[in-house]
Structure formats: structure tokens, C-alpha cells
Image (cartoon, rainbow, N blue to C red):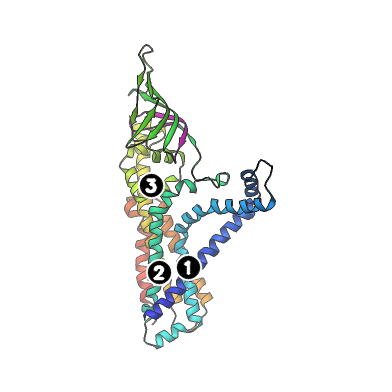
Amino acid sequence: MRTLDRYIARQYVINIVALILILFSFIIAIDLSLNFDKFMALAAKRGMTPEGDPSTARKLLLTVFLVFDYWWPKLIQLFNYMIGLIIIGAMGFTCSQLVRHREFVAAVAGGISLHRVIRPILVVAILATGLQALNFEFVIPNIADLIQRDREQASQRRLESLPVRLVPDGQRRLFYARTFQPDKQQMLDMLVIERSPAGPAVRAISATRAVWRDGGWDLENGVAESRTDQSAPREKVDRIVTDLDPTALKIARFSGYSQSLSWSQITEMLKRPELLVLNEEDREKEAVAQDVRDQRVAELERIRYGRASIMLCNILSLLVVTPFFLRREPTNMVLESIKAAPLAIGGVMGGVLGASAAIPGLPPQIGVFVPAIVLLPMAIAAVSSVRT
């Protein structure tokens, strides 16, 4: 049996890798056909030498490099959302090969149950799902800056410097900076406006440079000036303790950045709900601020628990379509694949949509698992219906 397990697992892994390569190559080919001129122009700009424009060969090599550099982080993220369909499609190809060569017939004739034959496929699928979990938790958060790049930023290792435009912290202070450098976790030409409970500014703190360290910003040439008493002397300020850290600044800048946070980072954000209302107009109105805060908390909870739901739905969808591919007699596998496709797509996409859409009356921690709850009895019935 170990020989049979290794054989089936090897075929299944080969089909998974082949599908990943074909799918990703197809995506890159489409993008390259639509944006080849943009990549070529960027390659000419990046490859400029003192002697003039780069040669055609050098420009083509730079274009290939820029395309690869732009797409590899996005493909790693896309892997997390496509692996469900990939493991189901790879199972279809693997079982089709085994049925075509009458290997399932030989296994059944040798007294091996088809339920036993599916075990190596299920083990490999669970390992692929585990790889998806590791990708969510460790890989995506570390390349989140690269995922956010546009085509003009290809080959840049980090997000380009960006301004901070009056972002409030938990103490109602407004932060402004000419430049925020996420990779160095620092702000240049920073201005912090402290306000009274009524709203008017009472003090302004300026600094040429601020570096995030241990729960606060260490200031370089930090000076505080009163906005209510012009005769008050300036005060030297070396540090500002705040809950507005670099992660919160990046979330304020990129609306989709929360999708790239790890479980631990989302947990940390949920411990500081005051950071979830970044719009100053919303913060001024307590009822509106609470409503926005609740929505953001629910969104982050759906992202966090939704990943577990997506992975569970991938495995359950795989089990739901097993009767179409585990056949003890030769049959038309193309027809069986057509029958299985709606169930497979519906199960996987149901998990993705269920993890992103709110269900009225249910907390997000439970609502995201509704697709998995629906798929569970279907998976049990499907596996039980396999004729063996």
C-alpha cells in the first residue's frame, strides 16, 4: 500500500505543480500582452546609462526582470485564493489518469477500497492547505509592501516614501509628515498637533525626523510650541508615546493592507480599537465613530477567522466532488468533470465569499463558517456514496 500511496501522491503533486505553473504563466502572459509597452518604457528608463539609451537586448532582459519582479509577490498572494480550485482540478487530472489506465480497476480487484485510495490525495491536499496557512501567516505580511506596488514601482524593494496627512491617534492628536518611510519606520519633517477636548489646537510639536521605537516616536530636533500663548517659551521634546505605529499608518494609506496582516497583527489591531477609526470627521461624532469602529472590528474578525473557513471549505469541496472521480469502472471523465465543476467552484467561491460578506444576526467569528457548515454534510454524503 505504501507503494500505491507514493505513486498516487507523486502524480497528484506533479499535477498540482503543473496547474500552478500553467495558471500563473497564463496570468502573466495576459498582463504582458496588455502592458508590454509600459514595461518596455520602464526598462528603458531604469536601464539608462551615461552613454544614452540601453541596447535592445539589455532592454528586453530588463523587461523580463521587471515583469517577474512585479508579479512574483502578487502570485504568492494569488496562490492563497486559487489553491482550493487547484487541488480539486489536480485531483480530477490524477483520477482521470488512473481511470484511463484501469488502475482503479486493478486496485478494487486487489481488494483495496476506493476510500483507501483517496487517502494520499487527501494528505497532499491537507499539506497544500497547510502551506496556504503558512503563507497567510508568515510570507504575505513580510512582502505586503511589495504586493502594494504598481507597475511603475517594479524593482523597488519597498514602498516608496509617502506623506502622512493629518492622521489621528488615540489621544486625538493629529500627525502630519512630509515623508513616511515604511521600511525604515521613520517620518521626516513631522508635525503633531495636540488639541483640547473642544477641538482647537493647543500645542504643536515639530521634528526633522521621528523613528518608531518601543511604543513611541523618538524625535530628532523635536520642539513644542504653544498655540494659545504666543509668549510661552519653546520646549524640547525627545519622544512622543502613541498608539499610531507604522502598521496603522500603512493601513491608513492602503485600504487593502489589512488583507496582508497576519493573525497576530490583526489581534494586535483589535486590542487597539481606537486606531480603527482613522477618518477625523468620523471621530468627531461619537455615534458615527462607534459604528465605524464596530464595522472595522467585524471586518478584521472576518479576515482573521475567514482564512480558517476558506481552508476548511477547500478540503470539504474536494471531498464533495470525489464521487465524480473515484470510479471503479471506466467512464467518460470529461463528462464527470463537467458535472463536478459547478460543485467545486461553488464550494470554493462560497468559502471566499462567506469569509468576506457579513451575515445579519451572526457574529463574524461564526458567520464565516456558514459555508463550511453547509458543505460538511454534503462532503459526508459524497464520500459515503462512493461505490467501491
Give the foreground label among 1 and 3. Answer: 1
28 versus 246 height, above or below: below
Q: Between residues 65 and 94, which one lies in front from this camera angle?
A: 65
Going from N to C along the chain, the mark reached first, 1 or 3, is 1
Q: Amino acid at mark 2?
A: Val
Quadrant in which the C terminus is drawn: bottom left
Q: Position of residue 28 (x, y in %)?
A: 57, 57
User: For the view shown, which residue lies furthest in the top direction?
Assistant: 231
Q: Which mark is residue 124?
A: 2
**Residue at 42% across, 68% down:** 318
Callout 2–callout 1 Cβ contact below 8 Å:
yes
Binning the other alpha carbons within 10 Å of mark 3 as few (below 14), some (14 to 19) or many (20 upward) gives some
Residue wearing tag 1: 16
Quadrant in which the N terminus is drawn: bottom left
Q: CA distance from mark 1 to mark 3?
A: 32 Å
Residue wearing tag 3: 299
